[in-house]
Amino acid sequence: MVRIGTECGLAEGKRAEKLIGESRSPLWVRRKVPSTAKSQRFCPQNGRPPAGGPIPSIRDVATTEDRPGVEPGTDEWRRELYEAAPERQGELFSTISGLENEPLYTPDTVEIDYDRELGYPGVYPFTRGVYPSMYRGRLWTMRQFAGFGTAEETNERFRYLLDHGQTGLSTAFDMPTLMGYDSDHPRSLGEVGREGVAIDSLADVETLFEGIPLAEVSTSMTINAPAAMLLAFYACVGEQQGVSPADLRGTIQTDILKEYIAQKEWIFPPEPSMRLVTDMVEFCAREMPKWHPISISGYHIREAGSNAIQELAFTLADGFAYVDAAIERGLDIDDFAPRLSFFFNAHVDFFEEIAKYRAARRIWARELRERYGAKNPRSWLMRFHTQTAGVSLTAQQPEVNIVRTALEAMAAVLGGTQSLHTNSFDEALALPTEDAVRIALRTQQVIAHETGAVNTIDPLGGSYYLEDLTNRLEAEAYDYFARIEKLGGVIPAIKENFFQREIADASFRYQHEVEQKQRIIVGVNRYELEDEPEVEILRIDPTLEGKQIERVKALRGRRDSAAVEASLARLKRAADDEADNLMPPLVEAAKEYVTLGEMCDALREVWGVWTETPVF
């Protein structure tokens, strides 16, 4: 290691300082001078030009052709050193969203307005985090997504996760439940309990949370078109446990707009669906103040093939649409905005994902404060759940997914998430086994307790690259907002298939890059294995479907049929009257053990169903 003196009149052969492997200010720095004067190099010790001889060039002080010892100017560094060595060919250096990356970011290329763009954690615009202490005060909630078979099997998995250190519950539902059909409906054949838990009535939710004190845990439920029915079931179980609705904590997804955009699990047309969402927002603001009635979801938009820019922009546009609907209903922004939450994807493009979360917080805070006039600072906070990217998991060499998931989880943590689900390595093949789920949970625990990532708040804040990327993502999102507004808003844009086409184009571009090997997927288009060992996967017992069908049939045989019919009649009358909030009649129907499918059928009868125009 070569060290030189600190005096600026240096002996020959000691022109500059280079401490390999150490971070230290360069000896020669460029000082800004008036535009009429020529910029020159000065010694930081005495502020004067170096004594004697010509000023050393950047090449003079470089230790190798591609490693400068000083940084007198980014342009000079690039011209004299970087461009002297060829770049790797074939692979892209852009982000997955297609944003070009410079080889180096410096103060010459990135201007950072600390107070306006960054600020402090817990302080507007919340770029650096929504809480002052972040993870030094409290770790994120470790919330693993779980659900399969009947309520009994999922209850057992919930207990397993809680016993292994999980701090919140997250419920996955099967396809019939998500689409508003009971398990004995002809369309449910072969799908009951396959990709989530089968829920037909309040009786199933009672079993699902048996032995789990709802006063002590927060619960997330990933369901959208029939979300109001599940919220009613959950409130009833809480009441049975002696927990007031006002004390229940958790989140229900309810984000119907992203269903039309990406996931396609809708039932009703957009307008009555938005009415039902707003009914839930109004009901929770009055009756369940600790509950998040919507988790505005970019996750499924990303899983459908969008890029990070689209995930950011489309998710926030949906959020603004929900705010507009609630205000139009007559709700005060500060009565409901603090309980809106978000759900983002954590993809494998590490820095782009972190920048995405930071840009999202800043945009939401600005729009809620400036556009909507929210006065309560809690209304400005974007609190979000993150799940690692299912679409990044590969069926080939599935153990490598553990690495992908760990990096994605770290991006979510460094991006300031409030809760996190880490995917299991076998989920490209099937629902996860208990062993795979435990590894996924341990991944979060290692990040929390072993890596040091939680020891300081927003440790990457101020990075020239990260701040520039955050700014660019923010600008791209605003460009999308303008395009959506020009189409008349989110619902008209859905009907024009705007979102669907944008996602399809992004998905096509990414797949083309993978097929051309411009983006390398380890084990897929490089580093393949010819003979891969089989991985043990979770197999759902096919007899569980019959068990669930018998369960719902038995329920219908023992309940009060007259009370059921009266509840359904009231629900239909409320659905036909725009002035009525549908949550009270749904809660009443739940208590009478009206099934989810029966409630949805009643609303189908009044509102009809939605059919999408295909995009080609």
Image: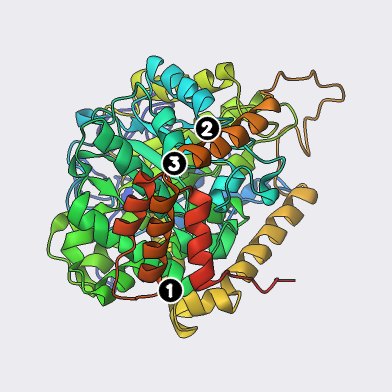
Q: How is the model colour-coded?
A: rainbow
| In the image, residue 438 above or below residue 522 | above
Please name whichever residue, 530 or 340, is drawn nearer the observer in this view of the structure.
340
How crowded pointer 2 is (Cα within 10 Å; few <14, some 14-19, many 20+) is rated as: many
The reply to whether discs 3 and 2 touch (Cβ–Cβ < 8 Å) is: no
Q: Which residue is drawn at 53% across and 66% down?
A: 604
**Element at label 1:** helix
Quadrant where the N terminus is found in the figure:
top left
- Disc 1 marks which residue? 481
Q: What residue type is labelled 1?
A: Phe
Nearer to us: label 3 or label 1: 3
Q: What residue type is labelled 2?
A: Gly
Q: Earlier in the sequence, mark 2 or mark 1?
A: 2
| In the image, residue 184 above or below residue 295 | above
Picture coordinates of residue 592, whole percent (x, y): 37, 46
Q: Which residue is drawn at 42% across and 59% down?
A: 568
Picture coordinates of residue 319, whole percent (x, y): 37, 63
Total tally of numbered discs in the picture: 3
Q: Which residue is drawn at 70% across and 47% down?
A: 519
| Residue 224 in view, yes or no | yes
Please name whichever residue, 416 or 95, is drawn nearer the observer in this view of the structure.
416
- Disc 3 marks which residue? 559
How crowded pointer 1 is (Cα within 10 Å; few <14, some 14-19, many 20+) is rated as: some
Q: Earlier in the sequence, mark 3 or mark 2?
A: 2
- Disc 2 marks which residue? 147
Q: Which amino acid does label 3 sit on?
A: Arg
Q: Which residue is drawn at 68% across and 55% down?
A: 510
Res 456 → quadrant: top left
